[in-house]
Amino acid sequence: MKTNRLLESQVIHTYASLLLEAAEGEGRVVEDLKELGIANKIIQEFPQLQEALGTKLIPSENRNALVNDIFEGSLSPEVKSVVAIMAERLDTDYLDMVAEEYQRLAEEKLNLVIADVTTAVAMDDDLRQVVSQKLQQQFGKKVYIEEHVDPSIIGGVIVNAQGKRMDASIATQLAHAKNVLSKNVSVGGDA
């Protein structure tokens, strides 16, 4: 089965490389990464679509047309083209891995780090600059911040970049405190 994994890896790398080359030509490297994630999310959220794009019962040209129809106007031509080709070849199951490889190649080629930064409320310009500077110091590269808002973290920040997760959220700190207290509290006894 090593041969199959090697072949899968090569296929994933090829899709990611082709998209990166096209995205660079259009000046849309980071934007296309976002769109690739959107396409993957949509396909994953609709089992009927996932099934239609993954079956030989539907001719390849129809799978291609389906992708073009669904994503018309919502994806750049280069992303839509790669996803359509993947659908033709029954490779849409690789979409999340293509996105990961695309990000790795883009970061390497452009010498930057794409960081997912989650906060409880939207960052203002000052906080965005502080976070960006801290991350640039940590990684020693230019940083592009992909912002997300998640009120459930209560406060603080969660950063995902280059396979690392830094969680300085209030929700996580409270969970850790609860865990420590639940292990160290003795019931009854002398004081």
Image (cartoon, rainbow, N blue to C red):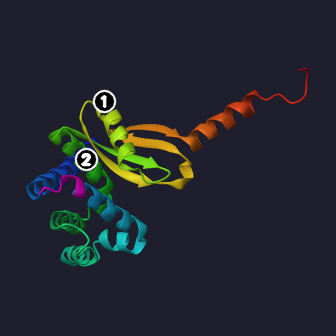
Residue type pointed to by label 2: Gln
Q: Is residue 169 left or right of residue 30?
A: right
- Choose top left, top right, bottom left or bottom right for residue 89: bottom left
Residue 66, given in percent of the width and then of the height, sits at 25, 77
Measured as percent of width and height from the top left, residue 190 is found at 91, 20
**Residue 68 vertical placement versus 12 (above, below):** below
Measured along the vertical axis of the image, is residue 23 above or below residue 48? above
Near-viewer residue (144 or 58): 144
Q: Residues within 10 Å of mark 2 (few under 14, many from 20)?
A: many
In the rendered structure, which amino acid carries the disc numbered 1? Answer: Gln
What residue span does the magenta drawing correspond to?
27-31
Q: CA distance from mark 2 to mark 1?
A: 20 Å
Count the numbered circles shown. Answer: 2
Q: Position of residue 122 (x, y in %)?
A: 43, 54
Kindly indicate the quadrant of the structure image that contains residue 81. bottom left
> Viewer-nearest of labels 2 and 1?
1
- Classify mark 2: helix, strand or loop: helix
Give x and y (percent) for residue 59.
Answer: 22, 77
Q: Is 102 inside the magenta-drawn segment? A: no
Q: Which residue is mark 2?
A: 103
Identify the secondary structure beneath mark 1.
helix
Q: Is residue 91 above or below residue 175?
A: below
Residue that appears at 21% across and 48% down = 7
Say which label, 2 or 1, has the lower sequence index.
2
Foreground of the two, 188 or 55: 188
Q: 163 or 59: which is nearer to us?
A: 163
| Horizontal side, residue 182 vs residue 8: left or right | right
Mark 1 nearby-residue class (10 Å; few <14, some 14–19, many ≥20): few
Q: Quadrant of residue 173?
A: top right
> Is 153 left or right of 25, judged from the image as shown?
right
Q: Which residue is mark 1?
A: 137
Residue drawn at (50%, 42%), measured in percent from left and top? 156
